[in-house]
Amino acid sequence: MAGRSLRLRAILAALWTAARRDLKTVGSFSGNNLFVVSAAFLFLGDPGAFVAFSAFIGLVLFIPLSADPLRVLPRDRLAVWPLSAGELRWLRILSPWLNPVTWLIAALAVWKHVSIGLWALAAGVFAIGFVLPSLPAARKGIWRRLPNFPGPLNHLIRKNLRETLSTLDFWCSAVVSAFCLGFRAAGLLPAEALLPMTIVVMLALSTYAQTLFGLDGDGGMTRYRLLPVPGWQILAAKDVPFLLVSVLMTLPLAPAAGLAAALSALAMGHHASVTHHSDQMRWRFSSGVSFGAGIFQVVVMSAAAAAVHAIPLLVVLCAGLYAWSTWWYGRVMEQQQG
Amino acid sequence: MISCSQLTKRFGAVTAVNALSLDVAKGTICAFLGPNGAGKSTTVKMLSGLLAPTSGQASVCGFDVATHPLEVKRRIGVLPESLGLFDDLTIQEHLLLTAQIYGLDKQQSRERIEQLLRVLGLSEGRNTFAGYGSHGMRKKTAFAMAVLPNPEVLFLDEPFEAIDPATSRIMRNLLVGAAARGITVFLTSHILPVVERIAHQFVMIRGGRIVWNSSAVELPSSLEDLYLELAEPPASEELDWLAAR
C-alpha cells in the first residue's frame, strides 16, 4: 500500500513539474505585439480595448491550456513501469487535476452566476483541448495536405506554412478575422472600422515575423546552412506563407492595407529573426525579441497600412522596403557561421 | 579532394580542434575516429562549411570552404550530427526538397527517391513527418538526403549509429561502391568493426589533435587495440551493487 502511494506520488510529482514548466511557456504572450498594444491601451485609459484584446488572447490560449497533463508521459514508459491496473486508474483520475483549467471548469460548475449553457460551452471546449493532442491525427502531425507552390523551394514553403499554422498568432488573427467577417456580413462593421480592424488582425500576426526561424530547431538551422541556395531565398521561403496568411486574414477587411502591413512587419522583423534566434513553441504565442523592436514594428506596420489605405500605390514602397530587407538579411544569413 | 591545414576551432577557453592538418584523396573512404568530445563533429562542421574555423584553412573539391561556401555546398552531401531535418516535412518531402534544390529533373528525382526509399527501408514510412519518426528513420532520411544529389564528397557524422544491421550493411556496401566510382567519403564512427571493413584511411583524434593518420595497409593488426591505446584508454570500474537479489 505504501509502495503504491509512493509510486503514484512520484509520478504525479513529475507530471506536476512538467505541467508547471508548460504553464511557464504560456507567458510567451507577454512579448506578443497584440498583448503589448492591449497593455498600452490600458495605460492610455481605454480598459475596454484591453479587455477585448485580452479576451481574444484568452480564447485562443484556452484550448492548448486544456491539454491532458498525462500526455507528457511516454506511453512506453508508463507501460514498462511496475504499476498495477488500480494504480493506472488512480493516475488517470488524479492527473487532470494538475491542470489549473480543470479547477477553473470545476469552479465554474459550482459558481451560481454562470449559466449551465455557458458552463457546458466552456467544458466542451476544455474537453476538446484535453483530448485533441492524444488523437492519432494530432500525433502523426496535422497540416499534411497543403497546396504545392511553384519553384524549387516548394517543400520549404509548405513546411513554413505548417509552422505558421501551428502558432497561436495565426489562430488569434483567424478568430479576429472571423469576428470581423461575421460583423461585416451582418452589416454591423462600418467602413471606418476596416483599417483599425485590419491593423488588429496584423497585430496578432506580426510578432511571428520577428521569430521566423523559431520553430526550426537546431536540425532545421543546420539544414539551412547546408542548402546551396542564397540566403534571401531561404528568407523569402519563410515570408511567402506569412504574406499569404496575412492577405487571407485581412480579405474581409482592407486587403491592400493588410498586405502593406505584412510587408512592413516582415521588413522590420527580418533583423530580429536573423540576428536574434530564439526558440519558439508550437501552440503558443510568438514572443518578440524586445519591447522596443515590437513597438517599432507596430508603429511602422500601422503607418504603412494607413498610408496604403489612403493611397494604394504606396504599397510599391512597402514592397521595395521588404525587398531590400530580404536581400540584406539574406546576406547576413550567408555570413553567419559558428 | 579534402585538404585542411592548421585548422583550429576554439570555443572560449576550450580548444576543440587544434591545428589539424590532413589530406584525403579522391575515391577514399576516410574514417575519422575518436572518443566523444575529441573534436570529430567540430571538424566535420568546419569542413562542410557549417562552422567557421578560428584559424587555418580548409578546401573541398578544390574550393576554399570559407571563401566559396556555395560552390562547396553544391558538391558535397552531408549527414550532420543534428541530422538537419525539419519536423514539419515528411520523409518523402525532405527528399523531394533536396532533389528540387539540387536541380535534379523530375524523372531522375523520382527514380532516385524511390530507389533510396526502397533500399533504406523507408518506403512504408515515407509519409511520416520527421518530427514523429524514430531516430533510425530520421538518420536514414538524412543519409538519403546526403547521397541523393550524387555529391563529389560525402561527410557523414556517425552514419552507422542507431541503424539496424541490415541497413547498416546496405549503407556500407553503398559507400564502398560509391568510393570505387570516385566519390570521397569522410565519416566519423564509434563502430570500429564496421569502419575497419570499409575505410581506406584512418585518422584518430584526441583532445582536438591528430594522434594517428595512416592508410588501411599501415594499420597494426587490430584497429580496436590501436584506438584504445591512442584515442581512448578504457577506464574500468565494477558496479558491485549490480547483482542478483
Image: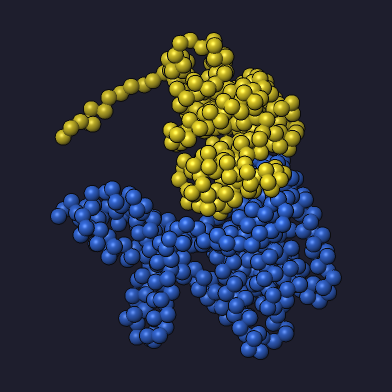
Q: Residue at x 52, y 70 (%)?
A: A60
Query: Front-most of A295 and A200?
Result: A200
The chain assigned the colour blue in the figure is: A
Determine whether A35 is above or below B180 in the image.
Answer: below
Determine whether B65 is above or below B88 in the image.
Answer: above
Q: Position of residue B219 (x, y in %)?
A: 51, 12
Seen in the image, is B19 located left or right of residue A308? left
Q: Residue at x 47, y 25 (%)?
A: B194
Q: Residue at x 57, y 18 (%)?
A: B201
* Location of the N terminus of chain A (image quadrant): bottom left
Q: Position of residue B13 (x, y in %)?
A: 56, 29
Q: Position of residue A236 (x, y in %)?
A: 72, 54
Seen in the image, is A6 located left or right of residue B91? left
Q: Residue at x 68, y 73 (%)?
A: A250
The picture quadrant where one finds residue B234 is: top left
* Location of the C terminus of chain A (image quadrant): top right
Query: Front-most of A146 and A247?
Result: A146
Q: How is the image coloured?
A: by chain
Q: Can residue A328 be seen from the camera position used here?
A: yes
What tint does the image give chain B? yellow
The picture quadrant where one finds residue B134 is: top left
Q: Can residue A295 be seen from the camera position used here?
A: no
Q: Position of residue A166 (x, y in %)?
A: 55, 61
